[in-house]
Structure formats: C-alpha cells, structure tokens
Amino acid sequence: MSEPRYVVAIDGGSQSTKVLVVDETGTIHASAQRRLRPTESPSPGHVVHPDDDLWDSIVEACREALGRFEGDRRHIVGVGLCTIRFCRALLDAAGALVEPVLSWMDERVSRPHEQDERVRYVTTSSGYLTHRLTGERRDSVGNQQGMWPVDQKRWRWSDDPVAYERTGMRAEQLFDLVLPGELLGQVTSDAAAATGLPVGLAVYATANDKAVEALGSGLRDEGTALLSLGTYVAAMTVGRDANATDDRYWTNFAAEPGRYLYESDGIRRGMWTVSWWRDLLDGGQGITDDELNVEASSIAPGSDGLFAVLDWLAPGGAAHRRGALLGFDGRQGRFHVHRAILEGIALTMRGHVDAMEAALGHRFESVIVSGGGSRADLMMRILAAVFERPVRRNRLTDAAGMGAAISAFVGAGVHASWSESVAATVHGADSFAPEPEWVLAYRPVRESYALLPRHLDPLFLEWQAIAERASDAR
C-alpha cells in the first residue's frame, strides 16, 4: 500500500482562520481554529483587521493543527491558501503593511486606490499572506474580485490602460498572477519557524473564499444551487460565460480555471446576526446555538408573527437600510427572535434565488447548504420548507477548507483532475425534504415578508435624512 499523502488547508474567513490537515480521501487528521479579533473602524467608512491579525491567526492555527497531527510530516505535499475576498492590503517596498488590511466592509475597497508615497504594492489578502508565507509577490487570479484591473475572460491582468485608470492602480504595483492550482511559492525558513510548516513546502493558489467553498461543497452542475451560510450569506451556481451579467446576479471566478460562478445578492451579516443574538443572550451563562435551536424548534413557522429584517449591515446601493425586528405583541420571547432570524435568512435568500432563477431561465432542483449554519437541523428544515425543495449538506461543514485542500491536491498532482479530486474528497452527509405542513405555513409568511422593503424603505430614508440634518447642525 502506498504511503498516505496530506495537504495543509488554510481557510481564512471573515470571523476566524481554520487550518486542516487532510489526506487524499478527504479525511481530516488534525485541525485548529483561531477567531479573528473584531474589526476596527479608525474613521468613518474605514474597517480594518487590527494590527497583523490575518497573519497572526494563520501562525497560531497552523502551529496548533500541526502539533495535533500524528502522521509523518514528510508526507505533507503542499498547502492550499484560501482567504477573504474583496480585501485590500497596502504594502511598502519591503512587503510590510503600511496600515492594517482593509476589510471587505471598508468603503475604500469599492473605490479606486488613492496613491500614497508610502505604498509600493497593492494586493489582496491572499497576495499579502502568500508574501508572508513564501516571500514571493504572487497571487491567485481567482481572488481578484472587486476593484482590480483584471481581465475576467482571460484570467490575467488587463491590457487596457482604462482598467488601471478606473482602479487607480499602476501595473508595477500589482503582484504576478497564477491560476488556481498553480504554485505560489515555497514556505520560507522564517515562515516555517513561525507556523511549524516544513521549510520549502509548496504553497498552491486557490481562489476567492466563496469560489473555494463552492468547490469544497461539490457544486458541479447548473441544476444545483449552493447556499453559503457564513458571515456573508449568498447563493451560487456554476457557469462558463465570463460576460454573463444581470442585475439579479453577478459573475465571479470559480476555483477551477475556465469556470465561473453566478452569485445572487446576499446578506452581508447573515450568520453573524445569529451569533450577535446568541452573544446578547449569553450574559456569561454559556448559552449555545444548540440550546437556542432546541427551544426554537417548538415554535410554529412564522415565529408567532415576528419578522427579522437582516440589514444589520446595509446592502450595497441601499445605505439607508437597517436591521429590524417587527411584530412583537407579547407572545414572543428570546427563542422567537432566534427563530425569526433563521427564518429571515431563509426568506431573504429564497427571494434572491427566485430572482437568479428568473434571470438564468431555469429552476434549481436541489440546494446544497454549506457553512456553519448548515450544522443546525432547524436551519435545514426551515430552508427545505421555504425553498420548497430538498436541501442537503456535506459531512464537513468547512467547505472552503476542503476546497483549499482540493486545490493543493490538484497542484501537487495527487489527483489528476479537479473532478477526480472533488469525487475523492467531498462526501455527502444527509438531506432534508420539505415538510408539507411547514411548506404550507411558510407560503403566506413569505408573501408578507416580501412586502417589508416597500414599507420600511421610506422610514429608513427619513431616518437617514434626519441624522444627516443633525450632523450638519453640529
């Protein structure tokens, strides 16, 4: 029997960094997780990851995961690096941060870069972390989402000078691009000393975190949608047209070269809101998501008339919107609020998926659910009833981690193709069929929920105007 081969999968998310040591069958042999520190807002509209938090979390999680690994480190063949998309790192000539990494929530990442004499290089979170791991100035083309001069059709930097003018970036400020599955570099001695990774270990490119999550979820056909239940909640399906566009979805790089993802509108603080409510309730008592779900399961669909509008962070293009809890009449308690937030996620995303289906001209027959939210049976039951079709989840909830592992296995030649690697490592867990009584109960709830924006938008716009007048008066 041949010796097992392993990869280290780094999954840098919005709330935490996870590191897995995975073998070629998708079995996890060690893992660790480090929560990121809360983002900071040093000035209005600016949101950053404090100090060098993204790198520090990788260092700590790698050391812990490798410390738990009981296999032979000589059989680790590579690292797959996946990090948060839409971030921006501003580096000096030595490759050090000029200021903390700009979060995807920072308004500057959606605007052209403003030149600063201190800034020699402009890159993504994955470009910066690649530099820390390997010393190379390389990045994955699959993570160039947002305000970057990238040619999405040809998977390379643009040749059009207008693209650089639009983004405010100069070609010499950008890192070299490689395709997902290609080599970024080797772990340096300094990075090895910090992380515990072997010196010289190959580091392979993945793509943006949502694309890698889709890969690690096994999303492969146009008749299936993936619902990603993370800090940012979105739905995706696969496609091959780089120029596909519609105001009801947008086109994103996939984790496999030559493929694309069509992505719906989303919820910018989706599962974050679930955690926010749990933490408010906790009060040092250690209340868990499982306890909340058990109690909320006994509440009827619709949460006795309570609605949660999930704009805790306003969507792009509608800065006036706010989160809201509506419909209190004395019957509801803390578990109603928890269930209403879960229902709000399902109802909002059903609307976004309906819009994407209408634009694409076909219906998704099934839905894969990934992310931490998929662990809860209650969430899965609500989704099946609201979407009125089967929903299924995989054995591993960290799909982005498995997607990073798949990319490294392909890069290292352990698996001959992307399809072979997905088939070898992604394993289904269980499926939830729509419960007829819940389906019937949620239909009028969905109709009522769809009316809320037309009534709340005028109110929130007026509140915004009042706040602006008050600010001007000061």
Image (spheres, rainbow, N blue to C red):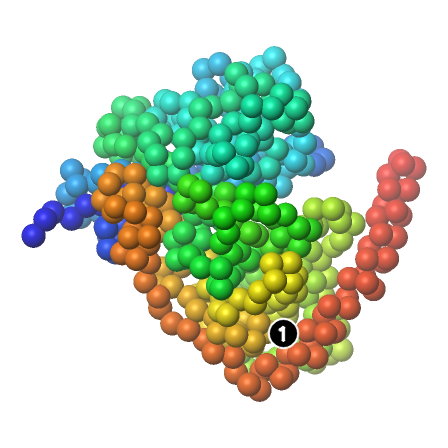
Residue 347 in sight here: yes
Does 55 appear above or below 468? above
Does 149 appear above or below 260? above
Residue 339 location (% of width, % of height): 59, 72
Residue placed most toward the observer, 467 or 94? 94
Query: What residue type is disc 1 on?
Result: His
Q: Quadrant of the C terminus?
A: top right
Residue placed most toward the observer, 191 or 347? 347
Residue 25 location (% of width, % of height): 24, 55
Q: Which residue is mark 1?
A: 336
Residue 275 in sight here: no
Residue that sits furthest to the bottom in the current view = 437
Instruction: Tell me: 425 left or right of 271.
Output: left
Residue 94 sits in quarter: top left
Disc 1 crowd rating (10 Å Cα; few below 14, some 14-19, many 20+) is many
Q: Residue at x 88, y 47 (%)?
A: 465
